[in-house]
Image (cartoon, rainbow, N blue to C red):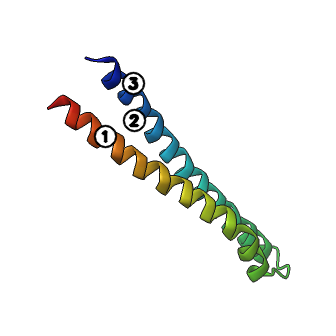
Amino acid sequence: MSNENAHLLIVEAKLRKACKSAFFCGALVFFAMVAIVMLGLAAEQPVDQKAIAEGWTPLIMLMAAICGICHFFHGLVKNKIQRLDQ
């Protein structure tokens, strides 16, 4: 195995981990937002759901963008590894 192939395998593993981390972080943020709304409703307190959604949406979109970018580069690295193995 060449140095380039070994390096690409390391990069591929790191990109896979980053993609999973960003996805689960985004899911965690989403469920935290839902929990805040549900707890407020369960306590019979007035909850401004629109304000909460507007405040948390950019963070969820950021996590989705990071996940998408990592997934894209992961695919590129994986294709390069396959070409080197042939």
Question: Which residue position is annotated with label 3?
Answer: 7
Report if the CB atoms under discs 1 and 2 are less than 8 Å apart. yes
Residue 59 horizontal/vertical position (percent): 68, 62
Numbered-mark total: 3
- The structure residue drawn at horizontal position 82% and vertical position 73%, both measured from the top left corner, is 43
Label 2: state its secondary structure.
Answer: helix
The residues tagged by marks 3 and 1 sit, at their Cα atoms, a distance apart of 12 Å
Question: Which residue position is annotated with label 2?
Answer: 12
Question: Which residue position is annotated with label 1?
Answer: 78
* Amino acid type shown at disc 2: Glu
Label 3: state its secondary structure.
Answer: helix
The residues tagged by marks 1 and 2 sit, at their Cα atoms, a distance apart of 7 Å
> Up-down: is 34 above or below 50?
above
Residue 28 falls in image quadrant: bottom right
> Up-down: is 51 above or below 12?
below
Q: The N terminus lies in which quarter of the figure?
A: top left
